[in-house]
Image: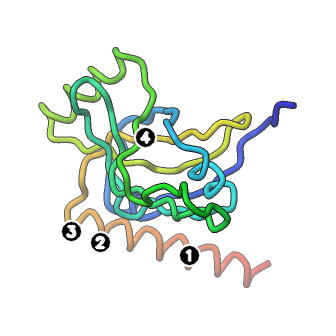
Amino acid sequence: MKKEGRKLIAKNKKALFNYFIIDKFETGMVLVGTEVKSLRIGNTHLKDAYAKVTNGEIFVYQMHIGPYPFAYYDNHDPLRPRKLLLHDYEIRKLYSKANEQGLSLIPLDVYFKDGKVKMTLALCKGKRLHDKRDSIRDRDNRRDLDRSRKENS
């Protein structure tokens, strides 16, 4: 029986604050059984995660998937590098842009799509301090506008 739809597991909120998103890619992940079970109970975070192309393959580093609590002897390493599944032309494109233009590969979210674990990988450019201040100012202005609309209603 195939599950339909998309179920969000984890989201990297700091990535939207720290980076300008240039392009997004949907990738598959190579995982072991206890990692998938741990993801099903929501035991993960993407706070410091990043991706890198090595030897024509792309890996995600520092993505923490906690140990599965019901596995006794065959549990996984929580911070091991995990291979991402992309087409060769997409990997070449990401490699060239990341190296030539100084862009970063940052995971935005992890989710189940039709029963498979997927990740949204973004090609990002880092924000400077004044860009972050602009983001904070915009967010505060939006919050004030919403608050005033709610009071007037």
Q: CA distance from mark 1 to mark 4?
A: 28 Å
Q: Is there CB contact under 8 Å for labels 3 and 2?
A: yes
Image spot of residue 21 (x, y percent): 37, 45
Q: Earlier in the sequence, mark 1 or mark 3?
A: 3
Amino acid at circle 3: Leu
Q: Is residue 149 left or right of residue 56?
A: right
Q: Comparing marks 1 and 4, which lies closer to the viewer? A: 4
* Image quadrant where residue 102 sits: top left
* Helix, strand or loop at mark 4: strand
State the separation of the CA atoms marked 3 and 2. 6 Å
Q: Nearer the viewer, residue 30 or 16?
A: 30
Quadrant of residue 69 within the rendered picture? bottom right
The type of residue carrying mark 4 is: Leu
Q: Residue furthest front?
A: 73
Amino acid on which the number 2 mark rests in the picture: Arg
Label 1 Cα crowd, 10 Å radius (few <14 / some 14-19 / many 20+): few
Q: Which residue is mark 4?
A: 121
> Residue at point 40% right, 36% down?
83
Q: Are marks 1 and 3 in contact (CB under 8 Å)?
A: no
Task: Say whether residue 110 is left or right of residue 98.
Answer: right
Image color mode = rainbow
In contact (CB < 8 Å): disc 2 and disc 1: no
Q: Which residue is mark 1?
A: 143
Cα gap from disc 2 to disc 1, whole angstroms? 15 Å
Residue 129 badge: 3
Asked if residue 124 is positioned above or below residue 71 in the image, the reply reads above
The residue wearing badge 2 is 133
The N terminus lies in quadrant: top right
Above or below — where is 58 with respect to 51?
Answer: above
Element on which disc 1 rests: helix
Q: Are marks 3 and 4 in contact (CB under 8 Å)?
A: no
